[in-house]
Amino acid sequence: KGPLVTHSSGNHAQALALASKQAGLEAYIVMPSNASPVKVEAVKEYGANVVLCKPILQDREDTAQAVMAKHPGSAFIPPYDHPDIISGAGTTGLEFLWQIGGEPLDALIVPVGGGGLLSGVCVAAKGLQPNIRIFAAEPLGADDAARSMQKGEMIEQTDPNTIADGLLTSMGDLTWPIIRDNVEEVLVVSEEEIVAAMRLVWMRMKIVIEPSAAVSVAAALSPRFQEISGLERVGVVLSGGNVDI
């Protein structure tokens, strides 16, 4: 059995590292050079090998291919652009709607990077509640999803610059069409709004979230979202707590 290989800046990296350890397999995780140190250390603590690369999709993919070339029999586990990954991420939407009970939600706000989580939530949530409105949340310094929606075609991320290091990559060939057809709007927020949202959740809710998760909160609090009519019950997906003090 060859090693498992992927590229990811956070959650998927740690999940594959732990799964590989439990299965007794070696893992190589390609991570962007600007990934949060706490995420890199967590991957290493789970026993995986970390290979750093430039923080753009093409370099992630090229580095992963180079790793696989050095290890015959290795298997690539996609970080987001695969039906199984999308389905797994979609259980977030299922759990959200199951747990709230009672009156249905008017909308969900989900952060977007590669789009695995967002596209999965779109499919799952609309499968249970077809009229639910889905909004994506994205940092201004990595706004390829917003620009893609405006243009009507996928635009790749080329030079991301944001504190939300879990949202640095481009959407995929599978995730983009789902997002295009099911997301009402991509809400773009500034770095200052992200930091303020993270501080608010830490201080008022006593929940430790990372900047990428705070992007959804910032979007919910943004003037643009506040002016949208017909939204009374809104769910906000907090996508991770990978942060150090």
Image: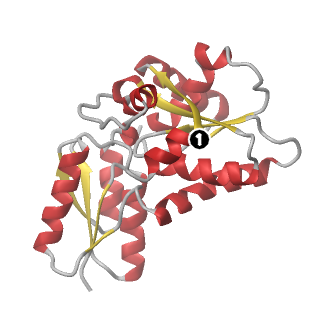
Amino acid carrying mark 1 in the image: Asn
List the single residue furthest toward the right. Answer: 102
Q: Looking at the rendering, in which quadrant would you find the C terminus?
A: top left
Spot occupied by residue 103 in the image (x, y as percentages of width and height):
87, 41
Q: Looking at the rendering, in which quadrant would you find the N terminus?
A: bottom left
Spot occupied by residue 31 in the image (x, y as percentages of width and height):
26, 51
Spot occupied by residue 39 in the image (x, y as percentages of width and height):
35, 50
Residue sitting at 39 percent across and 23 percent down? Answer: 140
Spot occupied by residue 169 in the image (x, y as percentages of width and height):
33, 42
Question: In this image, 240 relative to 12: left or right?
Answer: right
Residue sitting at 20 percent across and 47 percent down? Answer: 58
The answer to whether residue 220 shows anywhere in this view is yes
In the figure, residue 227 lies in which quadrant?
A: top right
Against 105, residue 98 (above or below) is: below
Residue sitting at 32 percent across and 42 percent down? Answer: 36
Residue annotated with mark 1: 182
In the figure, residue 157 lies in which quadrant?
A: top left
Q: Nearer the viewer, residue 191 or 63?
A: 63
Question: In this image, 91 relative to 198: left or right?
Answer: right
Question: In this image, 70 relative to 234: left or right?
Answer: left
The answer to whether residue 115 shows anywhere in this view is no
Against 80, residue 164 (above or below) is: above
Q: Nearer the viewer, residue 172 or 163?
A: 172
Q: Nearer the viewer, residue 237 or 108?
A: 108
Against 113, residue 214 (above or below) is: above
Q: Nearer the viewer, residue 10 or 174?
A: 174
In the figure, residue 220 lies in which quadrant?
A: top right
